[in-house]
Amino acid sequence: MAEPTTAARPKGAWKSTAARLKDAWNGVRRGAAQVDAATPAERDRAVDALRAFAILGVVLGHWLVTALVADDGGTGLRTASPLHHLPWLSPISWIFQTLAVFFLVGGHVATRGYTSARQRGTTYGQWLRLRLSRLFRPVAAVLTLWTVASALLLVSGTDPDTVHTLAKLALSPLWFLLVFAALTAATPLLLRLHPLWPLAVVLHVDLLRFGLGGPDRLGWVNLAAGWLVPYTLGAAWTRGELERPRAGWILLTGGAAATAALIAWAGYPASMVGVPGAGVSNLNPPTLAAVTFGLAQCGLALLLRDPLRRAMRRPVAWAAAALLNLSAMTIFLWHQTALMATTATALTAGHLPGLHTRPDHVTWVAARLVWLPLFTVALALCWAAFRVHEQGPRRPRGRRSRVVRSQPVSRDSETEAHHHA
């Protein structure tokens, strides 16, 4: 029997690999079809799609504009941003700073869920405990890990400034949860609040702070008022006041025009995220420019509802959005840890471009893009290790799908705990 030629072996191996990939894809399609079939027809899938895009925007935005620069003389790390050295990159923050969409969807879901819960006889306390329990369960794991990690780093002789930098970066997402939890608790008071009221507060705070020389600490009033604007827009969505495309266009064009005017003539920063070393941050605390920019984002989100509903009819797209929503808090809380774990681990190989070097050249941006897949792998490992704190333990085989079970069974059953953001 003749020996197979060397050319035949790669061809056969290629066919085998292609067949395995085809089988894997068919398995994905079958699973997606099951999720799609188990989703009630009346569910507004655009809500889940908007939340999924907001999550991805936050993660990619942080990964692109957060740099951990290694000290020249040691292994210490300090934060930096390409937006400080390359301000012409500020439009990146316009794409990936998607927190306003978080609060828009959160306000819509919370007000709809609270109204439905009250109609079913659920008390405010029961409703609030259900919503906040899923919000804060994953937080305990993050706090525990970073408390232990910080202690071990200090004991091992790591520079305290480096430990402070890493811990602050890892725990920075918690501010969002605290603000969101406070607004959630106030939902019964916000059901009818018009967005113009908190917008007026933001306007007056900035007038006092920047126009009349008021104290900077006055700006922290906007930490609540600023995010109340998209949250109460979500309540207006629930009331049916934003269904017409005209509302979305007004928010988009008006918000974009106001933001452009504030940047061009009022001296507000162009970046919609904080930039180390900058005199004023649009986000910390929120300024009027950040709020008007959020209005434009919310308008665009409202205009995208119908296209997203059509796109989410595809089973694979819908299953991806559902899975991302199911792990929203895990992804949100651990994405910075994934970045830092990759950066610290790779430091043993030297100061690598795009990872440990100063973000002061366009080549850094190109190098950072190469690292994004590795950040994704690190985040996937964090997800595998810590998702149980958000989703609960795996259910036995044969039981109803966790993805489907965790999704509300109707449009007005949003008190299900997965709708937390």
Image (cartoon, helix red, strand yellow):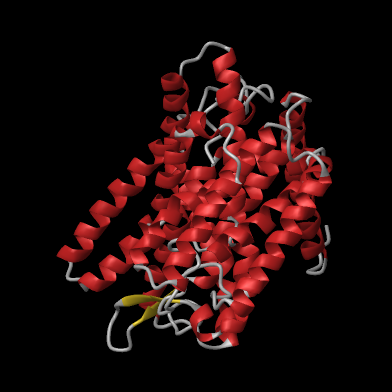
Residue for point 40% across, 45% down: 178
Image-quadrant location for residue 110: top right
The correct choice, above or below, for 232 with respect to 269 in the image is: above
Q: Quadrant of the C terminus?
A: top right
Seen from the viewer's position, the closer of residues 279 and 386 is 279
Seen from the viewer's position, the closer of residues 124 and 402 is 124
Query: Residue 256: x, y in percent?
Result: 70, 64
Query: Residue 63: x, y in percent?
Result: 52, 66
The correct choice, above or below, for 262 with respect to 73 in the image is: above
Residue lying at the far top in this picture: please name it: 121
Seen from the viewer's position, the closer of residues 200 and 152 is 200
The correct choice, above or below, for 187 with respect to 336 in the image is: above
Classify residue 17 as left or right of residue 383: right
Residue for point 41% across, 21% down: 125
Classify residue 357 as left or right of residue 190: left
Residue lying at the far front in this picture: please name it: 212
Residue 173, can we see it?
no
Residue for point 34% across, 63% down: 217
The correct choice, above or below, for 262 with respect to 178 in the image is: below
Residue 76, can we see it?
yes
Residue for point 45% across, 29% down: 393
**Number of numbered labels in the structure image:** 0
Query: Residue 414: x, y in percent?
Result: 60, 27
Q: Quadrant of the N terminus?
A: bottom right
Query: Residue 287: x, y in percent?
Result: 50, 63
